[in-house]
Image: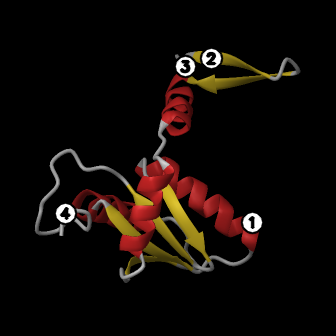
Amino acid sequence: TCCLIQVRFFDFAIVRFSLECALLIIWYCTMTTSSSDKKYFRSLGHQLKPVVTVAGNGLTETVLAELDRALADHELIKVKLDVGDRDAKKSTIDEICLQTKAQLIQSIGHMILLFRKADKPNPKLSNLLR
């Protein structure tokens, strides 16, 4: 059985979500980073090389696994997107952030900068602790 949650948006639309989807939306909306943290992350990300490239096949299981591994190791990563037009790029970025539970720090051209705090960061691998 599937548990559905009704959410009222601006008093004119009622949308039904599964419980798992609703929890992901709540988590994604409440995850915030201060502007000074984002500025610091952007300065660190400037020197980084892209560790993952999302190309014509889109977000496959192996690409998501590699993104998850890179975020667990490095916390702050740069990803290159080669997915087509602007709308496809935006939907790919949203899907990456939801699937990996990462926060988008910056998007310029075909490069995005993602951040996800590690539970136990490794000082030798983390881009934040070097």
**Hey, which quadrant is residue 86 in on the image?**
bottom right
**Image height of 27 relative to 102, above or below:** above
Mark in front: 1 vs 4: 4
The first of marks 1 and 4 along the sequence is 1
Q: Residue furthest front?
A: 36
Residue at numbered disc 2 = 5
The first of marks 3 and 4 along the sequence is 3
Residue 111 visible in the snapshot: yes
Residue at numbered disc 3 = 2
8 with respect to 72 (left or right):
right
Residue at numbered disc 1 = 87
| Residue 3 x/y as whole percent | 55, 16
Q: Does the residue at mark 2 contact the one at mark 3 (Cβ under 8 Å)?
A: no
Instruction: Identify the residue shown where x is 54% and y is 79%.
Output: 55
111 with respect to 91 (left or right):
left
Model colouring: secondary structure
Instruction: Identify the residue shown where x is 12% and y is 63%.
Output: 123
Mark in front: 1 vs 2: 1
User: What amino acid is found at the position of numbered circle 4 in the picture?
Assistant: Leu
Under circle 4, the secondary element is loop
